Structure formats: C-alpha cells, structure tokens
Amino acid sequence: MIALQKRPTPSRTLSLATPLIAVLITMIMGGLLFTVLGKNPFEAIRTIFWDPVFGEFAFYYRPQLLVKAAPLVLIAIGLSLGFKAGIWNIGAEGQYIIGAICGAGVGLAFYPTESRLIFPLMILAGAVGGWAWAMIPAILKTRFGTNEILVSLMLVYVAEQLLASMSLGLLRNPEGMGFPGSRNFSDFPAGSSWINEAAGLHWGMAFAFIAVIFAYILLNRHILGFNIRLTGDSPHAARFAGVNPTRLILFCLGTSGALAGLAGLFEVTGPSGQINIDFASGYGFTAIIVAFLGRLHPVGILLAALLMALTYVGGDLAQGNLGLPSAAIQVFQGMLLFFLLALDLLTNYRVVLKKKGAA
Amino acid sequence: MDLSAINPVLLIASLMVAATPLLLAAIGELIVERSGVLNLGVEGMMIIGAIAGFAISVETTSPMLGLLAAMGAGAVLSLLFAFLTQFALANQVASGLALTLFGLGLSALMGQSYVGVKPPAMAKLDLPILSDIPVLGPIFFSHDPVLYFGIALTAAVWWFLKKSRAGLILRAVGESHDAAHALGYNVIRVRILAIMFGGACAGLGGAYISLIRVPQWTEGMTAGIGWIALALVVFASWKPWRVLLGAYLFGGINVLQLNLQAAGIAIPVEYLAMSPYLITILVLVIMSADKSGAPASLGRTFHASQ
C-alpha cells in the first residue's frame, strides 16, 4: 500500500527540484501533444526552447525574451506577495489595462510637448491607476468581507470594456483617419519607454529588476515580509502576533495592482506602442503561472518569467516555421502549472510503502 | 432611441435562454461547494464543454450527442482537478485557476477548424395548443429541452440535498470532513463524485452557449459566465432555488442590456456591456455580509492523517 506521510517541514531540495521536474514532464507531454498535431516533437521542442537562445537568429530573439519577461516579472512579483499571505488577486490583467490607460492618457494629454518630466509623470499615473483598480477588491474585502478572487476577476472584464471605449473614443488618434487606437508612442519620444529600441531595452526591465530586489529585501529582511509569510502559514498565529489583516490586504493588493499598472504602462509606451482594442495580451494571467513556477520567490520568479518568455518567443517562432497553432503554447503553459501543483505533493508529503493492514 | 422596439414577451423568453448556461454551471458548482470543495475551474470546464459539444454535434449532426459529449468532456476535465486536490492535496484555488487557464488554451486549440461552422439546430418544444397561447406560449411552452432540464435539475438537486440520505452525507462531508470521516464515510469518494457532477453540469452549460444560445464557436466565447456562476452560488447562499432566481436575474440584466444596445440608447455600448460584471460585484458586496450558508469545510484540504 502506498501511503502519504506529512513531512514536519517541506523538503527544501524537492521544493527547488519540482519546478525543473515539472518543466521536463511538460516538455515530454508537450512533445506528445505536438505529435498529435502532426508536428515533429523534437523539432518543435528545439524550436521553442533552443533556437531563440542559441539558434542562428538568436541575436534577434534574445532581446525579445527580455521584452516579454519584463511585464511578467513585474506582475508576478506583486502577485506573489498576496499569494504568500493567502490573498488572491487574479485580476492583474485588469490592473495592467487600467495602468496602461491612465499612464498613456496622461502622456497623450501633453502631446506634442517634449519634456523630461512627462515620462516620470506617466509612470506615476500608471502605477496609481493599477493601484486604484486593485483597491476596489481590497476595500470591498476589508470593509464588507467580499471575495477578492471574484471581484478582481470581474473587474478584468470591466477593464476590457473600458479599453475598448478608450480606443474608440477619448484616446482615439485624432489623425488616425477614424481607425480605432490612440496615437503611437513611437511618434512621441517624450512618452516612450524605450531606452534603446534597437537593443530591445526599455524602462520596464529596469523596474522589473528593482522590483525583484525590493521584494527580496521585503520578504527576507523586513517585518512586513515576515508578517506576510506568517499570515500565509498560520493566520491564527499572525492574529496573536498582532498582525493587522486589513493593512496586509490593502498592502498586498495595492502593491500588486501598482506593479501590474506599471507593467501595462511600459508595455503600451514601448513594445505595444498604442492603446488599442487588442492591447490586453493575457500577461496578467500568465503571471499567475510564473508566480507559482517561481515558488513565490523573487529570484525564482525572475527565472520562471524568462522561461515563460521563452515559450512565447519560441512559440511565435514555431508558429512561423512549423505552423504550430498559437493556442498550443497556451495549452503548454497550462500543463506546466498542472504538473507543478501535482508534484508539490512530494515537497510536503513523504510517499511511504506500508504493509497492508498495518495502518 | 426606440424603447417600444423591446417586446416584453420576447424579453422574458430570451431571458430564460440567457439564464440557462448560468443556471446549469451554478447548480453544478453548488453541489461541489456543498461537499466542501471550491472549484474555480468552472470557466475552463464550460469552454471545454462548449467546444466538445460543438465539435461532436457538427461531426455527428446530432445536437443530443453533442450535449452528452459536452457533459463527458466537462467531467473528464474536472477529474484533473479532483486528482490534484484530492490525491495530490494541492491548493484548491491554484488548481482551479490552472483548470481554467488550461481549458481556455485547449478549447482554442480544439476549435480552430470549427470557426464559422454552423451547428445542427436543436428542435424546440412545440406543443399543438399550449405553444400557441399568446403570452404564456412563447414564455413557457416553446423552448429547447435543455432549458426545461435545467429547471428540473434545480428541483432534483433541491430534493437530493434536502430529502435524500446521499445528500445528507454530502452535506456532512462539506460541513466537517473530519466528523464525516470518523463516521466511516469516504470523504474523498464523495468529493470526487461531486466534482465530476459539477464538471458535467458546467460542460452542458458551455455547450448550451455554443449550440443553442449563440449558436456558433468563437474563441473564449464563455466570456466570464463561469466566473459569474461562481458568484451566483455565493449570491444564492448555497441554496438551489435561489440559484434559479439569481440566474434569471442575471439573465435578465444581460438580455436587457443587449436589447438597450439594439434600441440605440444614449449610453455607449461598452458601458452597457460591462453592466453584468458590475452588477455581479454589487450583488457580491450585498450578499457577503451573511456567510452563514457557506459550508464550514469549504476550500479546506482533507487528508486522513491530519
């Protein structure tokens, strides 16, 4: 008989190893999926995971990896704080959209003024926009005890409608000949997030690194980080230790909202270029996978975001070269989260063989 | 604007159609939550049901087989969640999210060759005299069979929870899995069966959208209905008849805003389209003051060693 025995403390080795094992199993299962779709699995896996980094055109794809990873890192770092404390913000996609709308709106209000002050102001507006959007579930939860999962998710759909309304109305390019979408930020240097477009560097990457460092210090060296971890591990103990749950909820949701808003701002003023109906790209949801794959640890999230960026860039490549449907990559990412959650069992429990009847 | 273009009889009839997918998914999730499990994967199971039902009924030209396939697909997908949460003891919130993300991706992959295809039509109830009664006929006697099935299912679930011994065991497991375990009930088995029932209902609800309500296949076509179904269970305080009431309320709001869009009211389309989600939030806020109806073990992991 196989039985499970709870470990006194989660295994550290396995906690680090399970993400790697999960990636390996996902590659194997993904290979099977690609075979079913009539593609050569080895070629597909190589195209997705090898070619963007080491292939012939890697010089073009490597900067792309950073472009895709930056928003994922920013959003996932914020989410991980809440997830650690058992506060589930799953509406980061909405906060990302609102951050982009607010930041871009402030920038476009100054068009075509050229000033060094405009971009910092836009950054502030993006962060405040995301923060405010996340404050809605936060305040409803602390004030009325409303479930933050459902509220934050409902607000994603609201934000998508707002985005459509903005790109067709208020923020529409007056010189756009009636097409939906705002002015393009590539025509507005003061409001552009690119540091060096040719090298694929934008300010979002700098902010992502800063976020990783701050989150690391917060979680390991600061009392607030300790309270977050304590609340997640044992809410009762946290209560006795004098942790104020209301402030923790406001902090975790607010921070993740602000970071998601920043991600949206850097995306709209750089890689994406304009507010448009199709701006929302699902980063807010993929970041949930990134947060878990990175073990809710800042450095882990950085690595996980790079891997996830690889599946995006490699997926595009495989779509172009092999005709692999883009949805296959979505399935691939979903599978990864499945295997990761299943393997977590080994971290928390020991699998032991028992003689029958000896229970 | 021309409000007189809105026909109240047609409004009520289409309200019932709009409410049915919501009702089916929510009544399934109600059983899951009454057994103490929170499955956030409703949206994923619905969209898988939507494409599975669509694909099978296009291939076999039988809507009935499509609906059955959708139920099967929803149940199979829910087994993944059951495995993760009941055997691998994974966090239910994370597992449910995984199910939704995976389901959305898989449905997009499966549905590629079905975009723009027209499914076979489902026959509507047509009773010789009853369906021709002026106002009552279109409202009560001329819908598709699934709509009536949804109402019957609500009654059945009410009877099951309130009157049957199996329902009592299910509620016991949901209120206190430790006590139910001590009494000798198989907590894991009860929960897996409940999860599969929830999956089948969500799958059927999804197929109702793609086969009857819309009827066509587009990527991500469930558009948050699975999440609204989750909110509906909270709204209903975990009681079947209130789920029916809530579903009709939400169906009504949705149909009304679509009618207002068509009538050309002065409010922009986008703001009308966001109203169902805003009203869901409002309802959640009002209902969240009273949590007495929630099963006591909701969302907690059970392992016999603890």
Image (cartoon, coloured by chain):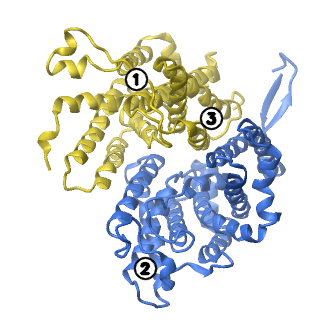
Chain colours: A blue, B yellow
Q: Position of residue A152 (x, y in %)?
A: 45, 52
Asked if disc 2 and disc 1 are in contact, CB closer than 8 Å, the reply is no
Q: Around disc 3, counting alpha carbons within 10 Å, would you say few (fewer than 14), some (14 to 19), or many (20 or more)?
A: some
Q: Amino acid at mark 2?
A: Gly
Q: Looking at the image, is A51 positioned above or below residue B155?
A: below
Give A94 or B72, whichever is nearer the viewer: B72
Q: Is residue B11 left or right of residue A220?
A: left
Residue hosting label 3: B301
Looking at the figure, which quarter contains the C terminus of chain A? top right
Q: Position of residue A34 (x, y in %)?
A: 73, 41
Q: Gap in Å between the C-alphas at discs 2 and 1?
A: 51 Å
The chain that hosts pointer 2 is A
Q: Which mark is residue A107?
A: 2
Looking at the figure, which quarter contains the N terminus of chain A? top right
Q: Is residue B165 left or right of residue B91?
A: left
Q: Amino acid at mark 1?
A: Ala
Q: Nearer the viewer, mark 2 or mark 1?
A: 1
Q: Looking at the image, is B303 positioned above or below residue B190?
A: below
Q: Earlier in the sequence, mark 1 or mark 3?
A: 1
Q: Gap in Å between the C-alphas at discs 2 and 3?
A: 48 Å
Asked if disc 1 and disc 3 are in contact, CB closer than 8 Å, the reply is no
Give B45 or A108, whichever is nearer the viewer: A108
Q: Residue furthest left?
A: B4
Quarter holding residue B80? top right
Residue hosting label 1: B121
Please check whether the numbered discs 2 and 3 fall on a single chain. no
Q: Nearer the viewer, mark 2 or mark 3?
A: 2
Secondary structure under badge 3? loop
Q: Looking at the image, is B129 positioned above or below residue B65?
A: above
- Label total for image: 3
